[in-house]
Amino acid sequence: MPTLTLPGVLSTYPAPTNPALPIFLSGALTAPRAVLFIAGLGNTLLSVPYLPALSAAFERAGWTLAQAMTSSSAGGFASGSLDRDVREIEGAVKWLREEQGKEKVVLMGHSTGCQDLIHYLLHTPSLALVDGAIFQAPVSDREFFNSLPSYDPSYLELAQRFVSEGKGEEALPRAAFDEFGGVPITASRYFSLVGEGGADDYFSSTLPQSTLSQTFGRLPSLHTPIALIYSGADEYVPEYVDKAALVRRWADTAGEEIVKAAVVVQGAKHDYSGGGEPEKELVGVVERFLKGVHGGQ
């Protein structure tokens, strides 16, 4: 990936797990509206290629782009959990509202960051409210890892055994790290990401409707608008997945009252590397969604 640069302000926000987590602000810095961006596995600040284009669009439209790092950023995901993530994300939401004066805060997740978003929304009764949620590349980690030629199911069996024995926070053998870039991973996080029914298993194409009814089906009660943006050429999605049908299924389950966008961007890679027309379409979808949030539509 080419080197990216982006002018802005680097600050910190407090969370229950850490009194000073990094957050980077760009776009329209003094705007009363912010999009809180949560990246995916292994990502850090400015490691998703489309962020400069998004920041430039936000500056024109009057939104701040806030990139928050959590304890799960970079290699921290391997010993983390969605529960820890959402507590930290709530800290960033509160900081944006209380310290930065943001009247509206919209969450935007990339890849595994989308798991954080839906987990956050489903726990909203006990978390700070947000004004919208944008899911970009909400892919299934389980389906991706299970489709790898190197996938060894014995590590999942071992992870399940560790968890059942109360040793979920212990690391799996070194050979299991290869699928995660060599980062040591705990049994509980491995099962969460790779196991059927794990805490991260929100977006698999094989999930029954009864499961979706307990996730997407619960979102309408929050009255929080959402956007579903899937990449048409996502390299982390197995070939057997019908992307358009999957997005329609999620949208139908959540309902048209809250689903303001449900699109598959043709030709788009997982993180829109290469830019071009797919990146322009992504930015356009996000801009239109935010215009609706701003106007209260």
Image: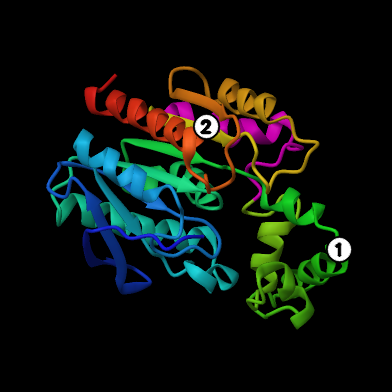
Residue tagged by mark 1? Answer: 153
Residue 224 position in % (x across, y down):
38, 31
Residue 185 in view here: yes
Where, quadrant-wise, is the C terminus in this rendering?
top left
Mark 2 surroundings within 10 Å by alpha-carbon count, few (fewer than 14), some (14 through 19), many (20 or more): some
Disc 2 is placed on an element classified as helix
> What amino acid is labelled 1 in the image?
Pro
| Residue 204 part of the magenta-drawn span | yes
Residue 233 position in % (x across, y down):
65, 38
Question: Of 215 and 181, which appears nearest the observer?
Answer: 181
Residue tagged by mark 2? Answer: 218
Q: Earlier in the sequence, mark 2 or mark 1?
A: 1
Question: Of 64 and 90, which appears nearest the observer?
Answer: 64
State the extent of the magenta-drawn residues as a range: 201-221
| Residue 176 part of the magenta-drawn span | no
- Seen in the picture, residue 97 relative to 266 is either above or below; the reply is below
Could you say which quadrant of the image residue 180 lies in?
A: bottom right
Residue 127 in view here: no
Q: In this view, does 293 lie to the left or right of 171?
A: left
> What amino acid is labelled 2 in the image?
Arg
Q: In this view, does 122 lie to the left or right of 293?
A: right
Could you say which quadrant of the image residue 80 lies in?
A: bottom right
- Seen in the picture, residue 241 relative to 180 is either above or below; the reply is above
Q: Which residue is found at the position 43% from the left and 37% from the top? A: 134
CA gap, disc 2 and disc 1: 32 Å
